Amino acid sequence: MEESEAVNSTDAAVLGSHITAIRAGSLREQITRALEAAMVAGELKPGEMYSAPALGELFGVSATPVREAMQDLAKDGFVEAVRNRGFRVIEMSDADLDEISQIRLLLEVPTTVEVADVITPEAIRRLSAIADDIVAAAARGDLIDYLDSDRHFHVELISQLGNQRLTELVDRMRRQTRLFGLDDLIESGRLVESAREHHHLLEALAAKDPEVTRSLITSHIKHIRGIWVGREE
């Protein structure tokens, strides 16, 4: 039995600009990025079911690349496959956020402090340019570019230690915390404020100040328990 080919009322009602924002890259990658941004923006609702054919119709493509993109997102914990029905967006519970927050604090705080000892001026310049892109994307409300640039920043930062497995793990944990809430931050202007934290972190790294670095990355991570996911502190 195939997933329904019709766009159901839920699909039509909630999907907006992010779901149709196709950018450069392979079709599968483009759709994955757009779906992730739609989840972050709240256009794909936690707990709701979505079919690949219905989403494909909104993208103007066949169901196959959408299904492949959804399978990639399932591996990263964004959605779960439901046989003969499609994919359900996974809701992050308080317990989930607590667990991910604890893991990220254990991983990212000490490793970012370590980066301060090895980072080069050239790497600081590269990261500063990426940080500029993050702020610019936040200012214009471009979630896909914001997410891409933010992800690029943190992958590049942790990669300074030369541990590929660590870099991939940090990247995956960061992505799993961002299921919803950023549209509210855009409207309030707080997303730009949050984006500027990347420059503050680079200043601490360039100064090789471990205590300020530790404080800034800790605060940055703790957003997952507050405004970063659209909830109160």
Image: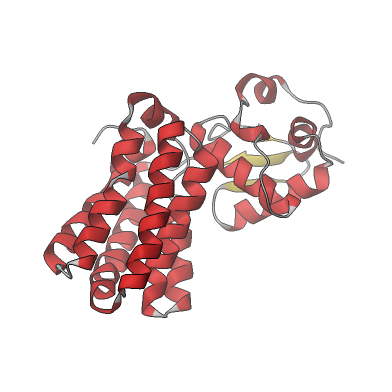
At x 19%, y 62%, the residue is 204
Residue 181 visible to the viewer: no
Percent position (x, y) of residue 206? 22, 67
Q: Identify whether 190 is placed above or below 109.
A: above
Quadrant holding the C terminus: top left
Q: Is residue 109 left or right of residue 49?
A: left
Q: Nearer the viewer, residue 97 or 210?
A: 210
Quadrant of residue 92 in the image?
top left
At x 55%, y 48%, the residue is 78
At x 41%, y 38%, the residue is 138
Percent position (x, y) of residue 94? 35, 43
Q: Nearer the viewer, residue 200 or 104?
A: 200
Residue farthest right in this picture: 1
Percent position (x, y) of residue 172? 48, 60
At x 66%, y 44%, the residue is 23
Q: Nearer the viewer, residue 76 or 86?
A: 76
For the image shown, how many numbered marks are present on the structure? 0
Q: Nearer the viewer, residue 60 or 79?
A: 60
Residue 63 visible to the viewer: yes
Quadrant holding the N terminus: top right
Q: Identify whether 160 is placed above or below 228.
A: below
Q: Is residue 11 left or right of residue 106?
A: right
* Image color mode: secondary structure
Percent position (x, y) of residue 9? 70, 19
Q: Identify whether 27 is placed above or below 49.
A: below
Q: Is residue 130 left or right of residue 72?
A: left
Q: Is residue 1 left or right of residue 203?
A: right
